[in-house]
Amino acid sequence: MTLTPKRAQDSLIQMTELVLPNDTNTFGNLMGGRLMYWMDIAAALACMKHCSAPVVTASVDNISFENPIKLGNVVHIESKVSRAFNTSMEVHMRVWGEDPVQQYRYKSNEAFMTFVALDPNGNSRPVPGIITDTEEEKKLYEGALRRRQLRLILGGKMKPEDADELKALFFEKI
Ligand SMILES: CC(C)(COP(=O)(O)OP(=O)(O)OC[C@H]1O[C@@H](n2cnc3c(N)ncnc32)[C@H](O)[C@@H]1OP(=O)(O)O)[C@@H](O)C(=O)NCCC(=O)NCCS
């Protein structure tokens, strides 16, 4: 059965959190682990919105924290499904901090996570495809195949010699 594809934009989740003392390290900055916890939830919500099923986190790509988010600042997380495969979905996330008093926003980080949809028996189940509208959505969609191959190689699920998209990228650059 082929599922009807859905728009990437319809999976968008915007999460807002306030950094409280229990969320910070000894420097008064938001702890990375707390931020990843919020990101995991925002990403899972986007996937559930897309596939209308429970999901589990399959993998998290590398996350670089560009700027610390201070105690009392606001965290904004935007997550959107960038591509759906068979039973898995890649989610793109953007994170900003905001100083609510001085009223400015600053970028914290960007990341990709992958989720798998499950049926009531806990087995992976098919998900609808993604329809892209904006240039940015199209770019993320195109790059998703390469990112998928890289994470499957790192996860021991694919042989490097089978990663055609990745190999093409390197040959293009040479
Ligand atoms: C993620 C999980 C469902 C994959 O199960 P599996 O038996 O390896 O499943 P399969 O090999 O059939 O793959 C299922 C999908 O997962 C994807 N997948 C598996 N490992 C992956 C990885 N390391 N990174 C990205 N995707 C991965 C596969 O590509 C496949 O996607 P596709 O159907 O779109 O091609 C399973 O490993 C699991 O339940 N892990 C624990 C999840 C968890 O507890 N997360 C944290 C709490 S939510």
Image (cartoon, rainbow, N blue to C red):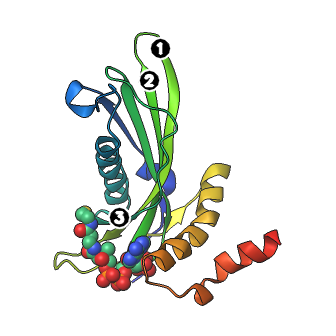
Marks 1,2: beta carbons within 8 A:
yes
Which amino acid type corresponds to the residue marked 3 in the rendered image?
Cys
As drawn, 28 above or below 123? above
Q: Residue at x 60, y 54 (%)?
A: 137
Tag 3 residue: 51
Left or right: residue 66 compared with residue 124: right
Tag 1 residue: 103
Label 1: element kind: loop
Residue 22 or residue 127, whichever sits in front: 22
Residue 129 or residue 124, whichever sits in front: 124
Tag 2 residue: 98
**Residue 109's spot in the image, x, y percent?**
49, 42
Residue 128 or residue 141, whichever sits in front: 141
Q: For ligand 1, tell me if the residue under mark 1 lies within 8 Å.
A: no
**Residue 26's spot in the image, x, y percent?**
28, 29
Q: Residue at x 32, y 52 (%)?
A: 40
Residue 100 or residue 29, whichever sits in front: 29
Q: Nearer the viewer, mark 3 or mark 2?
A: 2
Q: For ligand 1, tell me if the residue under mark 2 lies within 8 Å.
A: no
Q: Earlier in the sequence, mark 1 or mark 2?
A: 2
Left or right: residue 83 compared with residue 48: right
Label 3: element kind: helix
Quarter residue 15 falls in: top left
Q: Earlier in the sequence, mark 3 or mark 2?
A: 3
**Residue 20's spot in the image, x, y percent?**
24, 25
